[in-house]
């Protein structure tokens, strides 16, 4: 479930309306870091909506156990090493919302868990996680923007719900607040989970953008007609200016290269109390005010 479906988003701002040029600014209420972290740890599981925060990790943990201990074997009747499956899952959790390679995951397991896993096994297990809907990676943006800018083709790593990564890391709301770097990656995963839901409701596809000049856009939504919409995701309101600047620079560089620039630039944020359009044209919307 998205935050709007679980009634944790007011839905004051419609993604569809914003992309169609219909936007009304709103005061969206005070933002609360602890509440956002609790929403990440709880996840979008319908069975978790009324669960006390202290027990929110149990459902995603049980889901992972069921997949590793039962579903993977039932997939094709092959017995696999559950310990190595869990090592890889924990490595994916440590690298949530990043574009790390399979080789980097293998290296991460060696460095953190002091264990070796064959690179072919990594590839096989990652495919299994995808087939069993444990992971839902964000593909790279490869639209014909008619620009000479070369785009990287790495997927962005995501679990289907950020609560799975938190459960694997043993991270509750307090631990995330104490580790804001990890919290930002998990918040990005939360927002992209919801943006995926809202995009699909509007017939859009979702991607991420990364070029060889090290320019990145967290989330790209693309319509069937080729129009695309660029969003940065930032937990803190103090990061909005930098995010807007990044979006504008990328858009201008694509346009200067005779490419098709994005139709809309937006920042989806956590700790902001308003949805508004900046003087530079970039929209700012709290995730707790967004709907499809």
Image (cartoon, rainbow, N blue to C red):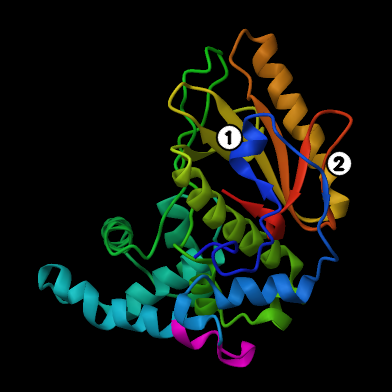
Q: Is residue 233 above or below residue 43?
A: above
Residue 216 picture quarter: top right
Find numbered disc 1 in the image and state the secondary structure of the residue it sits on: strand
Instruction: Let me know if residue 167 appears in the view.
Output: yes
* Front residue of this view, candidates 85 and 138: 138
Crowd rating for badge 1 (residues with CA inside 10 Å; few <14, some 14–19, many 20+)? many
Q: Which callout, 1 or 2, points at the residue further toward the start of the chain?
A: 1
- Residue 99 coordinates in the image, percent (x, y): 52, 48
Residue 182 picture quarter: bottom right
Q: Is residue 53 magenta?
A: yes
- Residue lying at 16% horizontally and 69% vertically, measured from the top left: 75
- In three-dimensional space, the C-alpha distance between marks 1 and 2, rounded to whole angstroms, equals 20 Å
Give the extent of the magenta segment. Answer: 51-59
* Front residue of this view, candidates 225 and 211: 225
Q: Is residue 122 magenta?
A: no
- Residue lying at 60% horizontally and 32% vertically, measured from the top left: 229
The mark lying in front, picked from 1 and 2, is 2
Tag on residue 102? Answer: none
Tag on residue 210? Answer: 1
Residues marked 1 and 2 touching at CB (< 8 Å): no
Find numbered disc 2 in the image and state the secondary structure of the residue it sits on: helix
- Residue lying at 45% horizontally and 82% vertically, measured from the top left: 47
Q: Is residue 82 above or below residue 276?
A: below
Residue 80 located left or right of residue 125: left
Q: Is residue 53 above or below residue 143?
A: below
Report which residue position mark 2 lands on. Answer: 241
- Residue 1 coordinates in the image, percent (x, y): 49, 65
* Front residue of this view, candidates 17 and 177: 17
- Residue 121 coordinates in the image, percent (x, y): 27, 62
Residue 185 picture quarter: bottom right
């Amino acid at each position: 479930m998205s935050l709007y479906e679980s009634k944790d988003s007011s839905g004051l701002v419609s993604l569809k309306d914003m992309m169609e040029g219909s936007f009304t600014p709103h005061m969206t209420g005070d933002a609360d870091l602890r509440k956002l972290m609790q929403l990440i740890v709880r996840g979008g599981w319908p069975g978790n909506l009324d669960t006390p925060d202290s027990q929110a990790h149990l459902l995603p943990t049980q889901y992972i156990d069921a997949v590793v201990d039962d579903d993977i074997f039932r997939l094709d009747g092959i017995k696999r090493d559950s310990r190595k499956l869990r090592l890889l899952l924990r490595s994916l959790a440590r690298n949530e919302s990043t574009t790390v390679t399979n080789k980097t995951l293998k290296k991460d397991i060696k460095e953190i868990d002091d264990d070796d896993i064959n690179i072919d096994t990594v590839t096989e297990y990652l495919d299994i996680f995808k087939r069993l809907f444990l992971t839902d990676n964000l593909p790279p943006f490869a639209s014909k923007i008619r620009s000479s800018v070369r785009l990287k083709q790495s997927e962005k790593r995501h679990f289907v719900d950020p609560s799975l990564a938190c459960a694997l890391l043993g991270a509750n709301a307090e631990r995330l607040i104490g580790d804001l770097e990890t919290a930002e990656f998990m918040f990005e995963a939360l927002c992209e989970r919801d943006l995926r839901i809202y995009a699909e409701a509007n017939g859009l596809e979702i991607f991420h953008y990364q070029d060889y000049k090290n320019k990145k856009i967290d989330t790209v939504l693309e319509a069937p007609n080729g129009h695309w919409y660029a969003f940065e995701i930032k937990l803190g309101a103090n990061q909005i200016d930098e995010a807007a600047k990044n979006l504008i620079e990328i858009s201008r560089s694509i346009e200067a290269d005779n490419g098709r620039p994005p139709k809309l630039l937006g920042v989806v944020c956590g700790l902001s109390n308003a949805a508004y359009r900046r003087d530079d044209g970039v929209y700012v919307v709290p995730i707790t005010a967004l709907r499809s």
